[in-house]
Image (tube, helix red, strand yellow):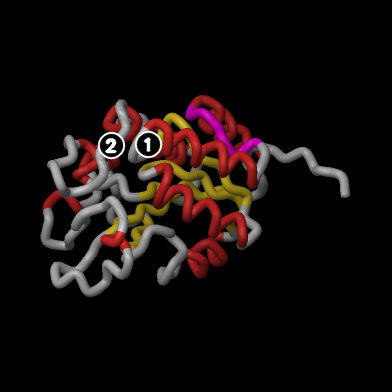
């Protein structure tokens, strides 16, 4: 079967802002979570521009917050690896970051696990919005972004990851995950400049 050339954005897009929480703009305290890659905070500072452009073109924006109950009952196997206790509901750093300026009328989903699809209403929302392309920003590239991408891919969404608006737990993990996502969908890796241009084009088309 011949491959079909794809646009950066196919059909209607939605912008997924994954776990850009207050802690995303703070150095990681020792023992709290695996160290952030160099430039993590700078990459998170690129996200608001993509959000602003999406708003200008009427693209739905869906904010995600990883949050766990203080009892730890919903961590599951998350603490079996490198990560320590993180994203407790009672921790001020768990709140959506002020920098992304989430509005009351934006879509907001709280999740207990890494993938934005797992145990959430995301698929119902995307179906209602008529979404075909998912644009992923946020962190970690090698955890929540990667797992959300894979789940979106397996549900036949076109998935695009804005590589200068995501950041990983390490440079090597970040790059490996970007390569893995590109393997699944050719052209998945995109820069913020490319996405901004594509959002303008799709706005005119729709």
Front in this rendered view, residue 154 or 15: 154
In the foreground, 7 or 150: 150
Circle 2 residue: 36
Placement of 148 over or under 40, stated as above or below: below
Closer mark to the observer between disc 1 and disc 2 = 2
Q: For the point 25% across and 39% down, which residue is it?
A: 35
Badge count: 2
Determine crowd level at label 2: few under 14, some 14-19, many 20+ residues with C-alpha closer than 10 A. some
Find residue 15 and report its horizontal and vertical position in percent: 47, 47
**Left or right relative to 149: residue 90:** left
Residue holding disc 1: 167
In the image, residue 180 lies at what x, y percent? 57, 43
Packing grade of label 1 (10 A; few <14, some 14-19, many >=20) is many
Q: Mark yes or no: residue 50 visible.
A: no
Give the CA distance from mark 1 to mark 2. Answer: 8 Å
Report the residue that reaches farthest toward the right. 1
Q: Residue 46 location, x and y as percent? A: 36, 30
Residue at image x 30%, y 56%?
65
Residue 172 location, quadrant = top left
Q: Is residue 169 visible?
A: yes
Task: Indicate the quadrant containing the C terminus: top left, top right, bottom left or bottom right.
Answer: top right
Query: What stretch of residues is rendered in magenta?
Result: 187-192
Residue 8 placement: quadrant: top right
Residue at 17 percent across and 60 percent down: it is 88
Asked if the residue at tag 2 contacts the one at tag 1, i.e. Cβ–Cβ closer than 8 Å, the answer is yes
Q: Is 28 above or below relative to 107? A: above
Residue found 28% across the figure and 37% down from its top: 36
Local SS, label 1: strand
Question: Which numbered disc flags the more N-terminal residue, 1 or 2?
Answer: 2
Is residue 35 on the magenta stretch? no
SS class of the residue under badge 2? loop
Rendered location of residue 1, percent (x, y): 88, 49
């Amino acid at each position: 079967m011949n491959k079909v050339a794809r646009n950066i954005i196919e059909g209607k897009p939605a912008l997924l802002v994954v776990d850009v929480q207050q802690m995303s703009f703070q150095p990681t305290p020792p023992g709290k979570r695996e160290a952030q890659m160099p430039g993590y905070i700078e990459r998170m500072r690129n996200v608001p521009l993509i959000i602003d452009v999406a708003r200008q073109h009427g693209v739905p924006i869906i904010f995600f917050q990883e949050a766990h109950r203080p009892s730890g009952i919903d961590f599951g196997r998350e603490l079996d690896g490198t990560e320590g206790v993180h994203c407790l509901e009672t921790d001020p750093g768990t709140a959506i970051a002020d920098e992304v300026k989430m509005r009351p009328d934006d879509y907001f989903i709280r999740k207990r696990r890494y993938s934005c699809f797992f145990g959430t209403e995301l698929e119902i929302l995307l179906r209602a919005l008529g979404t075909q392309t998912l644009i992923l920003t946020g962190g970690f590239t090698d955890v929540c972004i990667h797992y959300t991408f894979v789940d979106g891919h397996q549900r036949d969404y076109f998935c695009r990851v804005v590589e200068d608006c995501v950041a990983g737990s390490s440079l090597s993990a970040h790059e490996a995950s970007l390569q893995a996502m590109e393997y699944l969908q050719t052209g998945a890796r995109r820069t913020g400049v490319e996405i901004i241009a594509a959002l303008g084009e799709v706005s005119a088309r729709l």
